[in-house]
Image: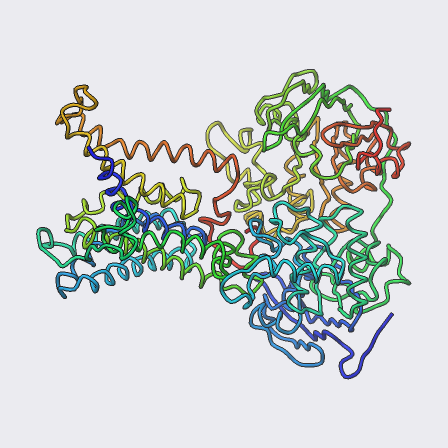
C-alpha cells in the first residue's frame, strides 16, 4: 500500500544525516523517507542509531550535516517545539509523562492554551472527543500513576494528536506492552493511518514489523543496510541478518538432560508488596539442578515480590531452602553466599550502579574475595583484569572497563549483569525478564548463557512475560496469577491457550 | 496568659514563616531544594533595614529585602542548575554566604530606628464581631498579605497553567522538556521567586513584625523551621500556613507560660525559673522535629507530596528523570 498525494509524496525526507557522539558515529549518512499515509518500520539493534535518527527528527538533536524536508519543505529544528510545529509527534520508549498529573494535564503540558486558569472539566471533554475519534481510551481525569502502561501509551499518542501531529514516531512502542495490548496498538496504528496520519514504527520485533509495516528501513551501526524496502518478501532470517550483519539462529539449542538434586525449595511462601497488601499467597515449588523453571504471568501479579523474597530483598512468611539451608528473611549477602545469582528486572536501579564504572559493577559480588580483595583493600589492577576478562568473555561492548555503566546500551548492560552473576558459579539463578527490551543479537546471547548454565547444573528460575521464550527455554512452567501459582506443567505439554487463560485468571488448575 | 493574645501573636509571627515556607514550596515544587533559606532571610532582613534607614522609607526597604533574597538565591540557581552541582551542599553554603554577608554589611545597624511598615485595620472585615477583632484589627499590612498569599499560592500551584508547568518540571523534567517547556528557565525563575519570598520573610521581621537588627539573632533559625514546615506540609501551602501560625502561637505560649505565678490554682513551675526557661524555649523546636518525623513518615507511607525530581539536576538526554 503506497499512497502518494499531490505536491509532496513524502511526509518526511531525511538525506545524508550525520551525527556524532563522543567516540561514536551514531548516524553515518543515513537516508530515510516516510510517505504520507504509510507505516514505515525502522529496525536495528540497540545502539544502531534508530533513536538518534528519530531524536534528530523530533528536534532534540541537531545533525552535523544533512537535510530534512517535511512535506516537501526544508526545515531546521532548533528545539522540540519547532518539530512539533511541523506536525511531528514522538512517543518515546520511556514514557514522557508526569505521574502526578492527570491525563488531561499531561496532554495540555507545554501548550499556550489554556492561558492561565486550568478549566480542566472543559478540557476533559475535548480530550474525550479526541479519544472517540481515534479509539484511544484513557480516563482524562485519572492521574497517570493510576492507569495501566497500555493506557499511558495511549496518552502519549493522544498528546501528539492533540498538538495536531500528522507524522507520528513510535519508539519501540511494543516493548512495554502485554500481548493483547500489542494487538490493540496495531489496531490503533491502522486507524491512525486510515485517518491520514503517517507513522514511523521503531521496533526490533520482526513479526510485528511484518504484521503492520508498509515499508522498512534497517540501521546497523549508524548506517542504513536497507532503505524503504517492502518487508513482505523477506523472511525473519533475512531481516535479522540485515540488523545484525550475520546469520542469527532462531532455533534454541536445548539439550535433553535429567535434572539432579533439588536446589531451591519454596514452601507456602507469602509476602506483601510495598503498600503492605498480600502479593504472594502461599506459593510452593521446587527447582532441581540443571532445570529451568519458568513462571508466566502478567506483570504485577506478585512476580517481583516472589523474586525479592528469594533473593533476600523482602521479608516473607513460609520457607525458602537452598540446598536444604533455610534462607527466608536472611540478608541478600546470605543468599549470595548460598550461591544465588539475581538478574533483576530493573537493570539500572537494582542490577547496576549506573554511575560507577564497568569494573566496579562487575566486582560488586566478589569484592571481598581474593585476588580482588586482599583483606581490607581492593586490588584495583586485579579488579581491572577481572573486568577485562569478563568484557571479552561475555562480549560486552564498551570503550573501556572504566566507562560508566550507564553509558552502556541495554543489551550490554544485561550482559554485564549476567557476567557478574554467572562468573560466581551460581547454584541458583533467579532471572526476571532477562531479555525484555533487548534486540535480537542480545536476546540470542542472553538465552545462550542461561542454557549454558543449565548444562552446568545450575537451577534457574525464569520469570518472563514473553511466552514463546518462556516455553522454549523452560523445562517446567507455572503461571502466577494474583499471587498464586495456578498451574505447574511440563513445558513440552504446555500450550499457549491454556497458559493465556491462566494468566488472566479465567482458568485455575493445579495439575 | 490570654488566648486571644497568643492567637494574635501566632498570626503575626507565623506570617514570617509562611512567606519563607511558601517560597521554599514553590522552589521545591520545581525540583530545586534550597537549604539557604536562613541565609536569604537574614540578608533580606539586613537589606530591608539598611535601605529603610538610609532612605527613611519602609516600602523601599521592603523592596530591597525582597530583591536581596532573590539575588542571593540566583547564586544557588547558577551553581545547581547551570553547573549541576549538589543542591544540599550549595544550599548549605548559601546559608553561610548569606549569614556572613548580612553580618558584615549589617555592621553598625543595631540599635538604630527605622521607619516600619504600618499596622492597620482592614475596613469592613474588622467590624465583624469577634473574628474581626482577632484576625483583621491592628495587624501589620504584611500579615494580611500573608493571609492572601496562602490561597493564591495554592491556586497558582494547583490550578493554573504556569503552576502545572512548575509541578511538571519538579516531577519529571524530561517530559516537560520534550513538550517544549523550558526546564532550566523555569527552575531559575522559581528559585528566584523562592529567594524573593525568603527575603520578604526576612524583611517582615526587621522592618515590620518585630522591627530591629540584631545580627544573626534577627532570624534566629526560623529559616530552618520554614524548611521543616515544607516537608511537614508535604509541599502544600495550606498546611504549611497552618503549621506556621501554630508555631508562632507555640512560641508566644511558651513565653507567656513564664508569667503567672499560678495556673488554674496550681503553682506555676515555670514562673521565672531560669533553667526551665531554656527548656520552654526549646519546646517549639522539639515539636518541629516530632512533626517532621510524623510528617515524613506519613509522606513515605502515602508516597505523595515529595516532588520526584527534587534535588536532581536535569541533564537533557540522560535516562531517568
- A461 displayed left or right of B236: right
Q: Quadrant of residue A43?
A: bottom right
With respect to residue A378, does A75 lie above or below?
Answer: below
Q: Quadrant of the C terminus of chain A?
A: top right
Q: Position of residue A385 (x, y in %)?
A: 58, 41
Asked whether residue A464 appears in the rendered view, the answer is yes
Residue beneath the point at 71% across and 65% down: A168
Where residue B253 appears, x then y in whole percent?
23, 34
Q: Is residue B112 left or right of residue A391?
A: left
The answer to whether A450 is drawn above or below residue B175 in the figure is above
Q: Which residue is pictured at 15% across the width and 55% down the height?
A: B106
Q: Is residue B43 visible?
A: no
Does B266 sit left or right of A179 as displayed?
A: left
**Colour mode of the rendering:** rainbow
Q: Is residue A394 left or right of residue B95?
A: right
Q: List x then y, in percent, for residue A48.
A: 70, 59
- Which residue is situated farthest in the bottom direction here? A7
Residue at 24% of width from left, 32% of height from top? B282
Relative image position of residue A94 (x, y in whole percent): 64, 53
Amino acid at each position: 500500500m503506497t499512497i502518494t498525494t499531490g505536491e509532496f509524496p513524502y511526509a518526511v525526507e531525511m538525506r545524508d544525516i550525520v551525527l556524532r557522539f563522543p567516540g561514536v558515529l551514531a548516524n553515518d549518512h543515513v537516508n530515510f523517507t516516510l510517505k504520507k499515509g504509510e507505516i514505515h518500520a525502522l529496525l536495528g539493534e540497540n545502539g544502531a542509531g534508530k533513536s538518534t535518527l528519530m531524536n534528530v527528527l523530533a528536534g532534540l538533536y541537531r545533525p552535523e550535516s544533512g537535510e530534512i524536508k517535511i512535506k516537501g519543505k526544508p526545515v531546521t529544528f532548533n528545539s522540540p517545539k519547532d518539530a512539533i510545529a511541523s506536525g511531528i509527534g514522538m512517543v518515546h520508549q520511556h514514557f514522557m509523562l508526569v505521574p502526578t498529573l492527570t491525563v488531561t494535564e499531561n496532554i495540555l503540558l507545554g501548550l499556550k492554551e489554556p492561558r492561565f486558569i486550568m478549566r480542566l472539566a472543559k478540557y476533559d471533554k475535548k480530550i474525550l472527543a479526541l479519544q472517540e475519534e481515534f479509539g484511544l481510551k484513557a480516563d482524562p481525569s485519572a492521574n497517570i500513576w493510576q492507569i495501566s502502561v497500555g493506557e499511558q501509551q495511549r496518552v502519549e499518542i493522544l498528546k501528539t494528536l492533540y498538538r495536531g501531529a500528522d507524522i507520528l514516531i513510535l519508539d519501540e512502542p511494543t516493548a512495554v506492552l502485554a500481548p493483547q495490548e500489542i494487538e490493540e496498538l496495531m489496531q490503533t496504528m491502522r486507524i491512525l493511518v486510515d485517518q491520514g496520519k503517517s507513522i514511523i514504527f521503531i521496533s526490533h520485533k520482526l513479526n510485528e514489523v511484518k504484521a503492520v509495516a508498509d515499508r522498512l528501513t534497517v540501521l546497523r551501526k549508524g548506517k542504513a543496510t536497507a532503505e524503504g524496502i517492502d518487508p513482505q518478501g523477506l523472511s525473519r532470517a533475512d531481516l535479522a541478518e540485515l540488523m545484525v550483519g550475520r546469520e542469527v539462529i532462531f532455533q534454541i539449542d536445548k539439550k535433553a538432560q535429567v535434572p539432579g538434586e533439588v536446589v531451591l525449595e519454596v514452601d507456602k511462601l507469602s509476602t506483601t508488596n510495598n503498600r503492605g497488601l498480600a502479593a504472594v499467597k502461599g506459593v510452593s515449588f521446587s527447582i532441581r539442578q540443571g532445570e529451568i523453571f519458568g513462571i508466566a504471568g502478567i506483570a504485577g501479579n506478585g512476580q517481583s515480590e516472589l523474586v525479592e523474597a528469594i533473593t533476600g530483598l523482602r521479608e516473607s512468611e513460609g520457607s525458602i531452602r537452598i540446598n536444604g539451608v533455610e534462607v527466608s528473611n536472611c540478608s541478600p549477602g546470605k543468599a549470595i553466599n548460598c550461591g544465588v545469582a539475581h538478574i533483576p528486572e530493573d537493570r539500572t536501579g537494582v542490577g547496576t550502579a549506573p554511575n560507577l564504572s564497568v569494573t566496579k559493577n562487575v566486582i560488586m559480588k566478589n569484592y571481598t574475595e581474593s585476588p580482588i580483595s586482599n583483606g581490607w583493600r581492593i586490588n584495583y589492577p586485579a579488579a581491572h583484569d577481572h573486568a577485562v576478562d569478563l568484557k571479552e568473555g561475555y562480549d560486552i561492548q564498551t570503550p573501556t572497563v572504566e566507562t560508566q555503566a550507564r553509558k552502556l546500551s541495554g543489551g550490554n548492560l544485561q550482559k554485564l549483569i549476567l557476567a557478574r552473576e554467572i562468573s560466581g558459579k551460581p547454584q541458583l539463578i533467579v532471572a526476571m525478564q532477562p531479555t525484555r527490551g533487548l534486540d535480537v543479537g542480545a536476546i540470542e546471547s542472553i538465552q545462550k548463557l542461561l542454557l549454558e548454565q543449565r548444562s552446568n547444573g545450575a537451577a534457574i528460575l525464569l520469570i518472563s512475560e514473553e511466552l514463546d521464550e518462556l516455553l522454549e527455554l523452560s523445562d517446567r512452567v507455572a503461571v502466577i496469577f494474583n499471587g498464586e501459582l495456578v498451574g505447574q506443567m511440563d513445558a513440552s505439554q504446555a500450550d499457549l491457550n491454556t497458559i493465556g487463560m491462566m494468566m488472566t485468571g479465567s482458568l485455575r488448575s493445579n495439575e | 496568659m490570654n488566648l486571644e493574645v497568643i492567637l494574635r501573636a501566632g498570626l503575626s509571627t507565623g506570617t514570617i514563616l509562611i512567606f519563607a515556607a511558601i517560597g521554599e514550596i514553590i522552589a521545591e515544587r520545581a525540583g530545586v531544594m534550597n537549604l539557604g533559606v536562613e541565609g536569604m532571610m537574614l540578608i533580606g532582613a539586613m537589606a530591608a533595614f539598611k535601605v529603610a534607614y538610609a532612605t527613611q522609607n519602609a516600602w523601599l526597604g521592603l523592596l530591597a529585602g525582597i530583591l536581596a533574597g532573590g539575588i542571593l538565591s540566583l547564586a544557588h540557581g547558577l551553581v545547581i542548575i547551570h553547573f549541576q552541582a549538589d543542591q544540599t551542599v550549595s544550599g548549605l553554603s548559601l546559608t553561610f554566604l548569606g549569614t556572613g554577608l548580612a553580618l558584615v554589611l549589617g555592621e553598625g545597624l543595631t540599635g538604630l530606628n527605622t521607619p516600619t511598615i504600618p499596622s492597620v485595620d482592614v475596613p469592613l472585615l474588622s467590624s465583624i464581631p469577634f473574628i474581626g477583632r482577632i484576625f483583621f484589627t491592628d495587624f501589620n499590612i504584611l500579615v494580611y498579605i500573608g493571609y492572601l498569599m496562602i490561597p493564591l499560592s495554592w491556586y497558582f500551584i494547583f490550578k493554573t497553567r504556569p503552576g502545572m508547568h512548575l509541578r511538571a518540571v519538579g516531577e519529571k523534567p524530561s517530559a516537560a522538556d520534550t513538550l517544549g517547556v523550558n526546564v532550566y528557565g523555569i527552575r531559575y525563575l522559581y528559585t528566584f521567586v523562592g529567594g524573593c519570598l525568603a527575603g520578604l520573610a526576612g524583611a517582615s521581621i526587621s522592618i515590620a513584625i518585630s522591627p530591629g537588627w540584631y545580627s544573626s539573632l534577627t532570624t534566629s533559625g526560623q529559616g530552618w523551621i520554614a524548611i521543616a514546615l515544607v516537608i511537614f506540609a508535604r509541599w502544600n501551602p495550606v498546611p504549611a500556613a497552618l503549621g506556621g501560625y501554630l508555631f508562632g502561637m507555640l512560641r508566644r505560649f511558651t513565653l507567656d507560660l513564664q508569667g503567672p505565678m499560678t495556673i488554674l490554682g496550681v503553682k506555676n513551675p515555670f514562673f521565672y525559673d531560669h533553667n526551665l526557661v531554656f527548656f520552654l524555649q526549646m519546646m517549639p523546636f522539639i515539636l518541629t522535629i516530632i512533626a517532621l518525623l510524623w510528617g515524613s513518615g506519613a509522606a513515605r507511607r502515602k508516597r505523595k507530596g515529595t516532588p520526584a525530581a527534587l534535588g536532581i539536576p536535569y541533564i537533557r538526554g540522560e535516562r531517568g528523570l
